[in-house]
Structure formats: C-alpha cells, structure tokens
Amino acid sequence: MPFECGLRKGNGWHVESASGLHIVAVVPVFRPPADLLERVRALRTQVDLVVLVDDGSSTLPFSDVDDSGIAQVALPTNVGIAAALNTGMAIAVRDGATHILTLDQDSTVPAGYVERLRAAAGADSSSLTVAVPASAGGAAVLRDLHGDSAPFDPIQSGQLLTADVWRRVGPFDESLFIDAVDSDFWFRALEAGISFVVADDAHIEHGLGELRPIRFFGRHLVLGGRARHVLYHSPFRTYYMVRNSHVMHRRYMRGHRARILKRDWKMFEMVFGCLVLSDDRALQWRAIRTGFRDARSGSLGKIPADVIASLAPRPAGADHS
C-alpha cells in the first residue's frame, strides 16, 4: 500500500476555483531534482492541488511542505511511470477534479500556462479534448499527418485533460513501465474519439535527454558553423524504447499505419544515433537486440535484473564478450 502524506479524507481539501472548476496536477517523482519543491510551489498558483507520487525512490515526503494543496504519495516499490501516473490520476478523480494536468518532475510551467491550455481545449469541464503545449524544452510539437494542426504523438508532460477523458480512455498501460506510455494513451484516446489540440501560446521547460558531442577522430564535429550533438540515452533506456516501440507497432499498425510508420522512423533516428555515435555502441546494440527479443516474447513490465546487469558498463580490461 502507498504511504499518503497530506491527503485529507472526503472533500476536506476540495476547493473549486472561481470558475467552478477543480484543476489537479499529477507529477510522478523518482529521485527528483533539488529544485522540485520550489517549482511545485510555483505550480500551485495555477492549480487547486498538486499530487506528487514517488515511484519507489524513497525521496518523499518532503518534510517542509506546509501547503494542504500539495499531496505526497510514496509507493513502496519502483513500479514505473505509468503506475505512478495512474495512482495520481485516481487521487485527482477521487478529489473531484474536473481537469488534470500531467507533468514530469523536470518540467517547469510558466505563469498563465494552465489557463492557456484550458482556453485551447474549451472551458467546458465535460470536453473530450486534450490540450498540449506548442513546445517542450525548446522542441516544437510534431504535427499530425497531412499538415494537420493537431499534435503528433505528444509527450504526456504538460498535457491538460478533463476527468471525462480519463474515464473514457482508461489508465496508462503499466506493462510498458516507461517509454511509449504516452504514445499508447494517445492511440487509445484517438480510437475513443478524443481530440488533441495544440495551445499555440503555451510552452514548457522540459528535459529531453542528454546531449553528447559527435566526435570524429577525436574532434567535435562542426557543420555549418555549429557544433553537432547526439541525443544520448543509456542502454537500459534504449531497451525500453525498442521493446515498447515494437509493442506499439504490433498493437496499432493495422488501424494507424501512417502514424505508426512515422513514429517508427522517429524512433529509428534516435536509436540509430546512439548506436552509431555513442561511446557505448556494444551495449546499445545489446539493448536493441534484447528489447526486440522481449517484445516478441511478450516479456513486458520492469526490465529484468539480469538484463540490467548485461547492459551496465564494465570495468576497464573486463571481458565484454
């Protein structure tokens, strides 16, 4: 059972905004950055409640929280971002949320952000529309097929949805653990008749990964006067990306062929960049092979301990066979 800190029973903490809406932010937490609480307090000025869900990292509760509008939940074990999101969403709905904002722990929303998304989605609390920011971490949201103004495969961080959307689509798929959790929700939402809209005047700060320099013959590659980098992911993350992308392909190829092929290509670009340009190419290749293997066999959930061990860097001079 999760440890809940700051959760009042019944409607003791339910405070609707002047508009009659009740907006709750859900933030999964795992070994959070040092400034998380500072950003959460700033977020509180835009929402009625912030639910922090610690995914088994034993970093919550924060002891210096004196705001009853910040709830802290500590899951006893690491069960993945999908399960952490589901825990927070269930609390939001239980508290009477009309709208739910999902955020990653490394995302920062500027003043007025929530209102911009709400305006884009429509003020009706029964709207079956999900609003997403125009950019995250400086990267513009991709657009859907044929120049459509709707977003393509938007990340879950920064999305604003109504409780009715959540009830219709259902929970995030916990078998995916991490990666493609938002993609799977997006596909299911489209199939349920949910619309996605981009709030063109809304932007969030968000960490998109580690940039590492591209080197040739020991020198940093410069093209067009710009130093070039590859977006690096650790081998264990590559494992999840490959495994879960293969799952997405099998699940949705028949009904969303063009979207899946576009998503496959984007994923190929990221994985290939790590495979070819990273220093740990052998481990990246092992992660790719193992991810495909487990996807084909239906072995989902948390990455197995033996796979984690096989993808860990080895001491210098050790046998890498």
Image (cartoon, rainbow, N blue to C red):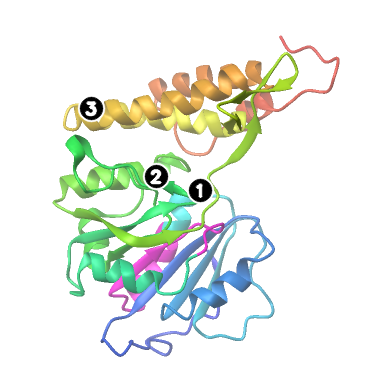
**Residue 93 on the magenta span:** yes
Of residue 174 and residue 165, the one placed in the foreground of this image is: 165
Label 2 amino acid?
A: Val
Pointer 3 local density, CA inside 10 Å: few below 14, some 14–19, many at least 20: some
Q: Residue at x 57, y 42 (%)?
A: 209
Task: Report helix, strand or loop for mark 1.
Answer: loop
Which residue carries the number 3 mark?
253
Residue drawn at point x = 75 percent, y = 18 percent: 218
Residue occupied by mark 2: 181
The span shown in magenta is 86-108
Callout 3: SS:
loop
- Give the residue pinned by disc 1: 80
The type of residue carrying mark 3 is: Met
Residue at image point 63% right, 18% down: 281
Q: Are marks 1 and 2 in contact (CB under 8 Å)?
A: yes
* Image position of 197 with respect to 98: above or below: above
> Residue 101's spot in the image, x, y percent?
38, 66
Give the alpha-carbon distance from disc 1 to disc 2, as whole Å.
Answer: 10 Å
Q: Residues within 10 Å of mark 2 (few under 14, many from 20)?
A: many
Residue 286 visible, this angle: no
For marks 1 and 3, give the one nearer the viewer.
3
The mark that comes first in sequence, 1 or 3, is: 1
- Which of the pair 79/255 is nearer the observer? 255
Does residue 148 appear left or right of residue 60 in this picture?
Answer: left
Per the image, label 2 sits on a secondary structure element best described as helix
Mark closest to the chain's N terminus, 1 or 2: 1
